[in-house]
Image (cartoon, rainbow, N blue to C red):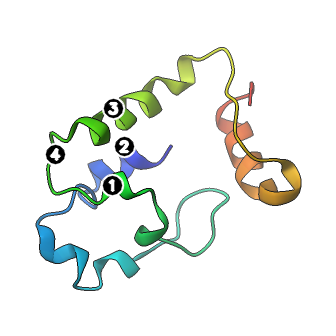
Amino acid sequence: MQLPTLKDKGIIPLKDESYLTNGYWDMVIDWIPGMRSIRLRDLPSFVQTTDPNDVIFNFVIEAVESAPKASGLVIQTFNVLEKEVLDALSTMFPCV
C-alpha cells in the first residue's frame, strides 16, 4: 500500500542501476504502519526497476491505488503471523 508514497518521495523507481549495488537497498523505511525495520531490499523485486514506465511496476501501483474501492481484500496471511500488519491494514480497509 505504500508503493505510491515511495514513488512520490522519489525512492522508487531507482535512479540508475548503481543503486542495486551501492547500499541503497539497505535503507530502512520506518514509517510504514505495522512494519518495523523494513528495508527496501525486503520489498518485492518488481520495485528494483530503473524504468518509470515498467509495466509490472505501474500495474502494481495502479492496483494499490484502486484497492480502497474494493468491496473486500483477501490477505494471504493470518493474525498470529502478522497481527501488526493486519491491524494497520484494517484501519485503511474495513473489509480486510
Q: Is residue 5 left or right of residue 75?
A: left
- Tell me which numbered mark, 4 or 1, is placed earlier along the sequence: 1
- Tell me which numbered mark, 2 or 4, is placed earlier along the sequence: 2
* Residue labelled with disc 4: 52
The Cα–Cα distance between marks 1 and 2, rounded to whole angstroms, is 11 Å
* Residue labelled with disc 3: 59
- Of circles 2 and 4, the one toward us is 4
**Front one among 37 and 78:** 78
- Tell me which numbered mark, 3 or 4, is placed earlier along the sequence: 4
- In this view, 14 is above or below 52: below
The Cα–Cα distance between marks 2 and 3, rounded to whole angstroms, is 11 Å
- In this view, 63 is above or below 26: above
The Cα–Cα distance between marks 3 and 4, rounded to whole angstroms, is 11 Å
> Where does residue 34 sit, x and y in percent of width and height?
67, 58
* Residue occupying image coordinates x 63% and y 70%: 36
Residues at marks 3 and 1 touching, judged by CB atoms closer than 8 Å: no
> Where does residue 40 sit, x and y in percent of width and height?
41, 68
* Residue labelled with disc 1: 47
